Amino acid sequence: MTFAVPAAAYDRFMGRYSRPLAPRFLDFAGVGKGPALDVGCGPGNLAAALAERLGPAQVAAVDPSEPFVEACRARVPGADVRRASGEALPFEDGAFAAALSQLVLSFVKEPDRMAAELGRVVRPGGVVAACTFEAGGLALATAFWDAAIALDPAAPDDARIPFRRLPELQALFARAGFRELRAGTLDVEARYDDFGDDLWRSLGAGIGPMGAYLAAQPPERQALLRDGCWDRLGRPSGAFTLPARAIAVRARV
């Protein structure tokens, strides 16, 4: 599994979800003032939404991928964007009024350490918030993994990915010692121009669990997987949309 890809490829794959999710996530988190930090910023969809509300000078962002850092800097001029992991944030204690992480925690090697870092860099009374896709909440992933398992019963599925259920996400924040925890769900839709040239091609970049699994299959298996996924999505013709649901937790330090 990799996220070491060009920013444009990632945006074609996941940006159509993270862009509409960002303002909903900020509304849920209740971020009203800066400075605010986006942890795991990717190409900058959440950072851009923060900049629209707070001004770019009030926004900082980090990501371990240099292409993503460069893309975020270009997208949000004036923001403080650095290459760093969520487990080792390059900021002083209490530097921010809010720290947020969108669609990241499921892929972090040390989530408890990252939660502790979120709390460290936020001042007392400030906001920490995170969201991930709910297990079974991403229609594309459900169709993809159902098709994969039909071809190979030993194939993995979406259920094995961590932090896809609210109790797990809430427990992480509770272990970090955060207070006033609040949980919720956030619904968005992603638009595709068509199945083959848009959706399926976006998976071909090898991004995330679905992309990595697809890239590891021989061409004939990829073709069968494509047909199975298309069938499970209702055999769309032309433009179509797919729903997605994220789970979210916010708290105070």
Image (cartoon, rainbow, N blue to C red):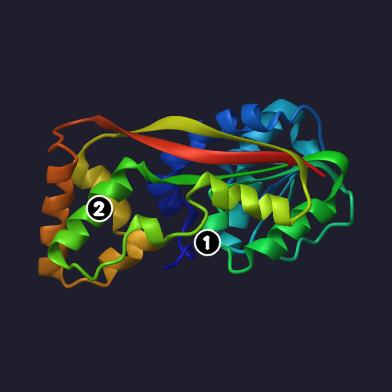
Q: Residue at x 17, y 73 (%)?
A: 218
Classify residue 100 as left or right of residue 190.
Answer: right
Circle 2 residues within 10 Å: few <14, some 14–19, many ≥20 = many
Report the quarter where the N terminus lies.
bottom left
The image quadrant of residue 84 is bottom right
Report the quarter where the C terminus lies.
top right
Q: Residue at x 66, y 48 (%)?
A: 73
Does 193 sit above or below residue 205? above
Classify residue 20 as left or right of residue 122.
Answer: left
Query: Where residue 175 sits: x, y (%)?
Result: 72, 56
Does 188 sit above or below residue 104? above
Observer-nearest of 193 and 130: 130
Q: Which mark is residue 144?
A: 2
Does 127 sit above or below residue 162? above
Q: Which residue is mark 1?
A: 107
Q: Residue at x 12, y 38 (%)?
A: 235
Query: Where residue 158 sits: x, y (%)?
Result: 36, 56
- Three-letter code, disc 2: Phe
Classify residue 43 as left or right of residue 83.
Answer: left
Query: Where residue 8 sits: x, y (%)?
Result: 45, 50
Classify residue 225 as left or right of residue 214.
Answer: left
Element under disc 1: helix
**Total count of labels:** 2
- Three-letter code, disc 1: Phe
Mark yes or no: residue 43 visible. no
Does 246 sit above or below residue 152? above
